[in-house]
């Protein structure tokens, strides 16, 4: 079965500091991977998706970037965090008609 | 602009009090409509996918239905453990495998 690991689970960072959130997928190869952000009381907003190593598509202009250095690894980064980057970040992969999610990373920017 | 709208935003039910959640969408070329359950601080958990108008799917106390404009998630005789946020998402042909989510309905079931 496929499993999605995200870390860290919780992160508190000051404004202007860098960010790195990591997602790894087990039990599948060449997955389609996604980063979503969920702000309080709002739906999931798609940030990035990747269909393969080094292939990143950005959905919205923002302060964040994504990279896919390995087949089953997807990283969300920022060089300088903003207050508005706070939220719940979810990694997901699409397989056989379903989108499977990880447990999420809660980011608070102070 | 493609939109997914869920209503109500929040719903409080007594245990055993059946009700429905609504998901209306304005997207052309629908490939699928998805329902997820999300517990606080957790990632969404897949419930159903519906592909065509008239289709219905059931799982325990939940039944999802689909028309050309909206989907309903019916909850029959809910229990406190059904309390969660229920998310609806649509997948359109022009978006490939990407899903567009609604804001969700927060359900609270009191015993």
Image (tube, coloured by chain):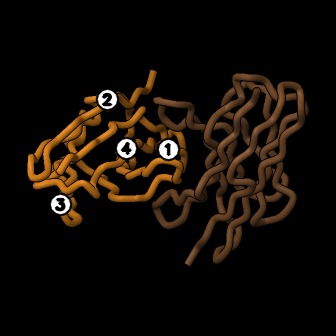
Q: Which residue is mark 2?
A: B9
Tint of chain A: brown
| Residue A101 on image: x %, y % | 55, 57
- Label 1 Cα crowd, 10 Å radius (few <14 / some 14-19 / many 20+): many
Q: Quadrant of residue A94?
A: bottom right
Residue for point 49% across, 44% down: B99
Q: Residues within 10 Å of mark 4 (few under 14, many from 20)?
A: many
Q: Which residue is disc 1 drawn over? A: B99
- Look at the numbered disc 1 and give the secondary structure of its residue: loop
Give the labeled residue for mark 4: B85
The residues tagged by marks 1 and 3 sit, at their Cα atoms, a distance apart of: 25 Å
What quarter of the picture does the C terminus of chain A occupy? top right
Q: Position of residue B37 (x, y in %)?
A: 38, 52
Q: Mark 3 or 4 closer to N-term?
A: 3
- Marked residue chain, label 4: B
Q: Are marks 1 and 2 on the same chain?
A: yes
Q: What colour has chain B?
A: orange
| Whether residue B68 is visible | no
Which residue was labeled with disc 3?
B61
B71 and A24: which is toward the camera: A24
Q: Chain of mark 2?
A: B
Residue B4 located left or right of residue A106: left
Number of numbered discs overlaid on the protein picture? 4
Q: Residue at x 68, y 67 (%)?
A: A25
Query: Would you place residue B36 above or below residue A84 in this image?
Result: below
Callout in the foreground (1, 3): 3
- Mark 1 or mark 4: name the one nearer the start of the chain: 4
Q: CA distance from mark 2 to mark 3?
A: 20 Å
Q: Is residue A86 above or below residue A24?
A: above
Q: Is there a contact, CB below 8 Å, between mark 3 and mark 4?
A: no
């Amino acid at each position: 079965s496929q499993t999605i690991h995200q870390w860290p689970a919780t992160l508190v960072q000051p404004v202007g500091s860098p960010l790195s959130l990591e997602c790894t997928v087990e039990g599948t190869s060449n997955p389609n991977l996604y980063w979503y952000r969920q702000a309080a009381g709002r739906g999931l907003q798609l940030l990035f998706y990747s269909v393969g190593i080094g292939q990143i598509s950005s959905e919205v202009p923002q302060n964040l970037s994504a990279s896919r250095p390995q087949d089953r690894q997807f990283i969300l980064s920022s060089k300088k965090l903003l207050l508005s980057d706070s939220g719940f970040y979810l990694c997901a992969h699409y397989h056989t008609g379903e989108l499977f999610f990880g447990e999420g990373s809660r980011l608070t920017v102070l | 602009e493609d939109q997914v709208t869920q209503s109500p935003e929040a719903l409080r039910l007594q245990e055993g009090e059946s009700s429905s959640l609504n998901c209306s969408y304005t997207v052309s070329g629908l490939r699928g409509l998805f329902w997820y359950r999300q517990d606080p601080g957790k990632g969404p958990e897949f419930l159903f996918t519906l592909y065509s108008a008239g289709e219905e799917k059931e799982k325990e106390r939940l039944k999802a239905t689909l028309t050309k404009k909206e989907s309903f998630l019916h909850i029959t005789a809910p229990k406190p453990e059904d309390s969660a946020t229920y998310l609806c998402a649509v997948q359109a042909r022009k978006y490939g495998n990407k899903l567009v989510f609604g804001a969700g309905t927060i359900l609270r079931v009191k015993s």
